[in-house]
Image: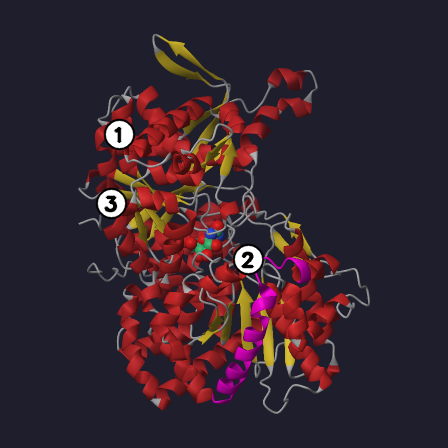
Amino acid sequence: MTEITAPKSPVTSGEFADEIREQLKYTQGVTPEQATAADVYVAAAKAVRNHLQDAWFTTQAATVNGNTKAVGYLSAEFLMGKQLENALLNAGLTDQFDAAVEALGFQPKDIIDAEYEPGLGNGGLGRLAACFIDSLASLGVPAFGYGIQYRYGIFKQKFDADGKQVETPDYWLNNEEPWGHIDYNRDQKVSFGGEVVEENGKKVWKPAWSVRAVPVDYLVPGYKSQRVNTLRLWTAKSYDEFDLLAFNRSEYMDAVKPQVKAENISKILYPEDSTKVGKELRLEQQYFFVSASLHDAIRVFYPGEAKPDLTTFPDKITFQLNDTHPVIGIPELMRILIDEYDYDWDTAWSITQKTFNYTCHTLLPEALEVWPASLIGELLPRHLEIIEKINAQFEDELKGKGIDDKTIERMRIYTGDAVRMAYLATYGGSHVNGVAELHSQLLKDVTLKDFSDAYPTKFTNVTNGVTPRRFVKLANPRLSDLITEGLGTDKWVADLEMLQGLAPLANDDEFVKKFAAVKAANKRDFVTFAKDHYGIDIDENTMFNTMVKRLHEYKRQALKILAVISQYAAIKNGTASVDDLQPRTVFFGAKAAPGYYLAKMTIQLINNVARVVNNDPDVQGKLAVHMLPNYNIEMAQNLIPATELDEQISQAGKEASGTGNMKFALNGALTVGTLDGANVEIREKVGAENFFLFGMTVEEVDKLYADGYSPAKYYEADPRLKQAIDLVAGGTFSNGDRNAYAPLVADWLTKDWFMTLADFSAYMDIQGEIEQLYQDQLEWNRKALLNVANSGYFSSDRSIEDYLTRIWHTGPLA
Ligand code: GLS
């Protein structure tokens, strides 16, 4: 861990209040008396940004001139969350801000809340990228996040009267956005289409159309590191915005056509997570940001040089490919080196391979992107040629290793019809990593087995992590204060393994009671939050049991809702031993991809179970269910600290890692989970006795598939399951309509690809243990505290340290 210096206290609160007033006056054009919370938010954001500006300049200069290799994190998604509070924390201005806005007659919380959350990511993958750039800056490692500034982020989720998900656009840029600095003078040209011709024995790409990539820079301040890195998000503009001739012919729509075509590229984030979307526009987006970013890096590191020595490029910056989305960067760098800078193939290949590394974030084969060769040929004809040549070289290399033809055939990057981006990334980069131990092992054993056999040293693991700044310090101030009290220092915020020092305090009943009081207070806060935001009433004296994540069959929200239905039926029938029953409030939060039929139907079912359960006087005070709309970072920051029991119940071998699981453990929730993804490591760290494990292992799942899985058998065998499914099929949650959930029920009984039914009995059985432990609040909280104490490993600072030593081979600026 690098030595972290304390931030200078840059201003007094009085001075900071003056800076906010100045922003109100000169950039907002309002007097302090006229200012609304939204005005003060923008003014404060600009004021804090000004404070970061000098550190940003010095970090940039050190990055370019320093002797430390930088990191380029290429990611189609950065799910940043609200910025102001985090920027204040990292700039060391939180106290000044609080006092300043109070002096202006506002509550700090109202100003923080006035920020509109940018949603430039779908879920775990995008949030991981945001955590990583926070950690890079906090560790003082020079880094650039490179991505797209989508005009519309992830859709806003609403529910209609039938409980169905309705997607509405996310107009996040319709209000003033004070963080991004648009830099028209550092634009890049990105071209598409056309043809490749030979000129003087050289291949020359003659593109058909181009767009202007304009960078929007976001400052990424490190926590107490005095370093401010850059998140550079590209926005697409047209070179010929307006066709005046068409306009003069009164063809008004035609006049803006070029603009629309160009700007479409950065218009919208694809609302897909872990699924493949084969869309032309998506490939355009990928190439757009990757091409602009690579050119930008050359501009940054070789300023003004017409003939830079790009053999040194891999010593200047190492690029991490966040999943397959930026993998077109490999042929693009080859093209830049060969076509634009006249390097020969072998030199270009050596530079390229040294420059890139690839992180795989999935185990679902359908989520590994495969592009039709025809599409690449049309959009990027020169790249298709390069990919063919890479593939030929690859096949030769494999032959040279004595690998048989059948295996080579399986491994082909370019099949003639298609290009497999994960294979291109694996061959074209130096390292490949999975995101949790189990995941990395399965990549080697299954998904990329042939590659791991051929290139065993390329493969490594870096277990994911989450930033303690946002997800403990900001999200859970009460727990943070208690941790600081317990440890006698707040240094843990930058060195999370220090949490281990809390473990002995789990034997101190007084400390455990304080910990319990923190949770109780957080629950009360969430009751208020839920009333304000969703208009719902929650009983704070119930167990808060949460399942928040994207809606996917493999994550098995269906398992949870079937268990809830079963519990509901048991209470109604009097078969539950009600005396032992711990009243529970079950929270769900999940967005489904708009085209994902069964996922959307599952949301509808959850909403309707909630409607029935919450309106049934027989279960009042015993069970309540809420499907909270529009799960996002803000909700996570409020709900996770209030949660007592967290659900991580995916089918073993399907969740690459999960990061929500880490956030919950760090905030003192106990987990009920399968041996999947990072759950395995969380359980190892916090202790098996402090984790509710259930369900089949990867091996058992594989065996059951191999033996022939028949879900109906499980339906017949467990009366609780049969009853729950029968209630769904019989119309209990659809006003008597037996057809409403027929496709879902049919899927459960005949396919059930992710074996929800096979794990149901084990899941119900573990509930008994959960109920029993919850009755002993001291014991429960002791275990919860041990979860906090032993989860320091899951800091994204540790993940970044692992990337630095295992993959990037670089470190902090001096
Ligand atoms: C994901 C995985 O599904 C998660 O398990 C993982 O935690 C995350 C970050 O590594 O990446 N892959 C994906 O496409 N979306 C994800 O959240």
Q: List x then y, in percent, for residue 772.
A: 51, 87
Identify residue for label 1. Answer: 303
Q: List x then y, in percent, for residue 263.
A: 55, 32
In three-dimensional space, the C-alpha distance between marks 1 and 2, rounded to whole angstroms, equals 43 Å
Q: Name the secondary structure under disc 3.
A: helix
Say whether marks 1 and 2 touch (CB < 8 Å). Answer: no
Crowding at mark 1 (Cα within 10 Å: few <14, some 14-19, many 20+): few
Which segment is the magenta one?
749-776
Residue 18 within the magenta-colored segment of the rendering? no
In three-dimensional space, the C-alpha distance between marks 3 and 2, rounded to whole angstroms, equals 39 Å
Identify residue for label 3. Answer: 58
Say whether marks 3 and 2 touch (CB < 8 Å). Answer: no
Quadrant in the rendering for residue 779: bottom left
Say whether marks 1 and 3 touch (CB < 8 Å). Answer: no
Q: Residue at x 64, y 89 (%)?
A: 578
Nearer the observer, 729 or 708: 708
Quadrant in the rendering for residue 423: top left
* Most common secondary structure along the magenta stretch: helix
Q: Quadrant of the N terminus?
A: bottom left
Which of the two labelled residues, at mark 3 and mark 2, occupies the earlier sequence position?
3
- Residue reaching furthest to the top: 200
In the rendering, which numbered label is found on residue 63? none
Q: Is mark 2 within 8 Å of ligand 1?
A: yes
Q: Residue at x 68, y 82 (%)?
A: 570
Q: Name the secondary structure under disc 1.
A: loop
